[in-house]
Amino acid sequence: MGLEGKRVLFLIAPENFRDEEYAQPRAALYAAGAEISTASRSTGYCHGMLGSAVHADTTLADAVDQAWDLVVFVGGNGADTYFDDDQAHRLATNQIQAGKPVAAICIAPSTLAHAGALEGLHATAWPDQEADLVDHGALWEGTPVAVDTAPTGSVVITANGPKAAFAFGQELVSVLSAE
């Protein structure tokens, strides 16, 4: 498989995360052998916009200072809960500073942007987030998936929404396999 022993964290909103933006990348990483944890504000069930219920096995507070091989910020309407969240920002910047990959899809790249993690990097997001990303120093890409490398060597993967979820998942597997 290839990703055995690799620890991946998905951060989802307690309510209204985008189901396929979680499920498709998670399935790709799981199939490749990664160990996956899901975090939210609290443990327990989180609810997707399309009706799925996903169990968060850890909290953002507990996950923020752990070492992860990859951290994925999941989008959906509820993802804005993390845009200005200090712990979510620390989670992103910890990954960047450690030279480890970080990823976000849909509106979630705004969390990375607000954390300063996209400064000078090519990134994409849901189209209505373009001004927010650019205002925070990102170089806007209108593509479904964008990949760039931070000065620390951290690979930053962003995607623009549900239709890109499958390709996003494949890119996550590719980047993590190269680590």
Image: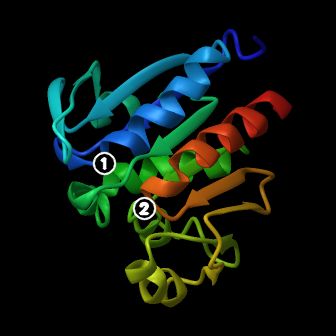
On the picture, is 92 further left or further right than 59?
Answer: right
Residue at 32% x, 57% y is 86
Q: Estimate how packed mark 2 is, as few (under 14), some (14 to 19) or many (20 or more) residues with alpha carbons within 10 Å.
A: many
Few, some or many residues within 10 Å of mark 1 (<14, 14–19, 20+): many
What residue sits 41% from the left and 32% below the top? 23
Circles 2 and 1: CB atoms closer than 8 Å: yes
Seen at 58% across and 71% down, the residue is: 124
Q: Quadrant of residue 118?
A: bottom right
Residue holding disc 2: 106
- Taking depth in this image into account, of 75 and 70 the one nearest to the observer is 75
| Badge 2 amino acid | Cys
Residue 179: give x, y in percent of width and height.
81, 32
Q: Amino acid at mark 1?
A: Arg
Q: Which residue is mark 1?
A: 18
Name which of mark 2 and mark 1 comes first in the sequence: 1
The image quadrant that residue 20 belongs to is: top left
